Amino acid sequence: MKMSFRWFGEDADPVKLQQIRQLPGVNQIVGTLFDQPAGAAWPEAEIAALKQQVEAAGMKLEVIESVNIHEDIKLGRPSRDQYIANYITTIKRLAKYGIKVICYNFMPIFDWTRTDLFYRLPDGSTDLAFDHTQVQGSAQAMIAKAKAAHDEYPMPGWEPERLDDLATLFTAYEGVTEADLAENLRYFLAAIIPTCEAEGIKMAIHPDDPPQPLFGLPRIVKNRNDLDRIIHMVDSPMNGLTLCVGSLGEDPANDVPAIIREFVGLDRVPFVHARNLKRGANGDFHETAHASSAGSIDMYEIINTLTESGFDGYIRPDHGRMIWGETGRAGYGLYDRALGSQYLNGLIEACAKAAE
Ligand code: DNO
Ligand code: MN
């Protein structure tokens, strides 16, 4: 398993590459061009610059999270073909610089959703939380809150400029069913996977987070059956999954170890996000430190299942708490993700040695 660390880029991330470099056993950066709008063909010069920065800091860049999908592709509008052509251009350019995996999502309008970015844990740290009672009505209250909270470091998908255009987007999704959205994903994959095969890039769709419909919008990446449907839309090893333990684990009905066994076994999991959370009732949860003892997920069982299944792809610690007075991008501070990387590396070493 290749331990990696998400980094948003020199301008967008208060965490420095030199800090990540000092984490033992963390050699891979999960990078992005944060400023590129969904639908753009990524400029080659910027890809080259990112690669150069990461390598100059002594690490590797082989995973991109995310190349975001334009809403017209998700909506199946005629203009999608132009955005798909741009996506193909981006895939080719990324391949040229040694990228092996592209993580993306197919969530309408929003990326991951939380109702509280600063939920206070008993130890005085804060973490991300989700309370279903706060998303039952319109999206407007959430949006106002998101605008206030994300001025400095917006969550992906909740950028202030996007939030201004939401009414139009919500209207566009009226009447779009899960079947429609799935068909639009299939159309997208059918168009891009031949290029991925030629270029050696694995696509890795991220589960919906949380894995349930929100604001009446359709969601199609919630559970084992959804994942099964997706990998068969285009039957290629390049059509893979980001196995996000936290996102899938938010729904107690998801048997995450069984999902790992099945889809790693089929060689469709190039990328894993590992984190813990504490579940409440009705799909509510708050995130926690990575350790098994901190939350509802047995992280030993997760890593052991990955080991037994022969997983040899990329893995990263996921959201961390804000601890020791750190400020910055909620969920993506340095300290707790650094602790997470070391805890996960310990589990990986122990499981690997036990399996020898
Ligand atoms: C949240 C992340 C997601 C993920 C995207 C991938 O922290 O896991 O924002 O990057 O959904 O497209
Ligand atoms: Mn994730």
Image (cartoon, grey):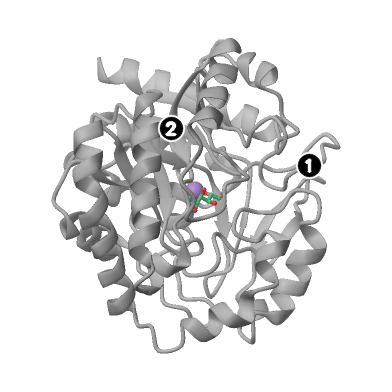
Q: Which residue is mark 2?
A: 63
Residue 202, image x, y percentages? 29, 38
User: Residue 304 or 33: which is nearer the viewer?
Assistant: 33
Pointer 2 residue Cβ closer than 8 Å to ligand 1: no
User: Residue 181 or 294: which is nearer the viewer?
Assistant: 181
Confirm whether residue 280 shows in the render: yes
Residue 354, image x, y percentages? 31, 19
Q: Give the quarter of the figure containing the N terminus.
A: top left
Residue 161, image x, y percentages? 70, 63
When the figure is inspected, residue 271 is found, relative to residue 112, above or below; the finding is above
For numbered disc 2, what is the local secondary structure? strand
Using a 10 Å C-alpha cutoff, classify the residue at mark 2 as few (fewer than 14 neighbours), some (14 to 19) or many (20 or more).
many
Q: Residue at x 48, y 45 (%)?
A: 66
Q: Which residue is mark 1?
A: 328
Q: Which mark is residue 153?
A: none
The answer to whether residue 188 is left or right of residue 93 is left
Looking at marks 2 and 1 on the same chain, the residue that comes earlier in the sequence is marked by: 2
Residue 222 location, quadrant: bottom left
Specify the amino acid type for callout 1: Gly
Confirm whether residue 244 shows in the render: no
Q: Residue at x 41, y 57 (%)?
A: 207
**Which residue appears farthest toward the left when viewing the image?**
235
Q: Residue at x 29, y 41 (%)?
A: 269
Instruction: Name the mark nearer the viewer: 2 or 1.
Output: 2
Pointer 1 residue Cβ closer than 8 Å to ligand 1: no
The answer to whether residue 324 is left or right of residue 134 is right
Specify the amino acid type for callout 2: Val
For numbered disc 1, what is the local secondary structure? loop
